[in-house]
Amino acid sequence: MAAELLLATFAATPRRYKAIFYGLLGKDTVSNLLALREYGLLSYFHLYPKLSQSKFQAQLVKLQQAGWLQIDQTAATATLTTAGAQFLQAQQLTDYWPHAYDYWQFGDWQLQWQRLLLGVQVVSNRWHQVQQYQPLTESFQVQQELHAWWRYWSQQDWSQFKIELQTILSQLPESAGILLANSFSSNSFPGLTSQHLAQIQQQSTTVLQLAQINSLGLLLQQLQQTPQQWPMLTSLLPLPKSPLPRSAAQTYQQLLSGQTWLQIVQQRRIKENTLKEHLLMAAILIPTFPFQNPTIQQLCHQDPAGFFAGRIAQLQGGAFNA
């Protein structure tokens, strides 16, 4: 990620730069999620899962040396300077970040991107009777998923996939549809490399990747709205059933089922603080979270000055802006 683009994650008020780093990396602690929600950066979660802390820190130093960011090492916060805010606005850096892709709705963008590219490659090579080739992704998970997807649709007319893909791309904003189409490749259609695409669009490869992620998000939004219209694409690019990790989702479902706190603790055999973190995560990520649930109210009344009650009160009162 270019250091200048990182400016878009900061503001004129101090922000915890470690929370931003861990958010981009994909560390889903309650503390990080609360900070990201407060900063309006929840949708950027897990956007850079391979970002190194040393590189991130070096970029902060670069921004500080440019006079765009003021860093408080003691408080571990960073603040946009007046010059930084002016540069951010003049260069429209916020516009480069993907606004259509949300990790909590669509899952890991890298996995979705690999599924899409490999799916197009597999169908195209089948169409042109190419039987031996190197898959575009080395991910064992994605390859196994594509095998299952292929077997499920093996008796179908593969022209249907072509129709779905062409139709959905035509319904996206023109720039997004063209970018996705030019990102596909197979043995019969080599496609364009990221470097070539970046040169054509007169962008850096980093900005190109962000544009590809945003375009992918636009496509997934279409699938989410009318999944029955795109059966093959919908099964190729599955959406998460819940934004919560499996254990947190189980705790949340027990809450919704009407179980008391004692019943939840006895059944799960997990530390109570961990179970409370599960519920806080649900309160952060699920818009319909039942703040008035008897179990939630019970926990808040047990320790009204505690961390759990305080965060519930802030979330319920809208102190954090998504």
Image: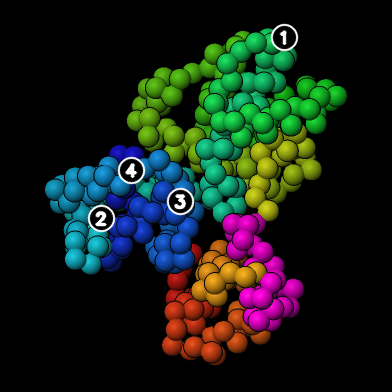
Q: Can residue 89 be found in the magenta stretch?
A: no
- Occupied quadrant, residue 124: top right
Crowding near the residue tagged with mark 4, few <14, some 14–19, many ≥20 C-alpha atoms within 10 Å? few
Q: Give the residue type at disc 1.
A: Gln
Crowding near the residue tagged with mark 3, few <14, some 14–19, many ≥20 C-alpha atoms within 10 Å? many
Q: Which badge, 1 or 2, comes first in the chain's sequence?
A: 2
Q: CA distance from mark 1 to mark 2?
A: 55 Å
The residue tagged 2 is 85
The residue tagged 3 is 26
Q: Give the residue type at disc 4.
A: Ser
Left or right of 6, for residue 184: right
The local secondary structure at tag 1 comes to loop
Crowding near the residue tagged with mark 1, few <14, some 14–19, many ≥20 C-alpha atoms within 10 Å? few
The residue tagged 4 is 52
Which range is magenta?
242-267
Q: Give the residue type at disc 3.
A: Gly
Picture coordinates of residue 91, whole percent (x, y): 29, 44
In front of the other: 162 or 279: 279
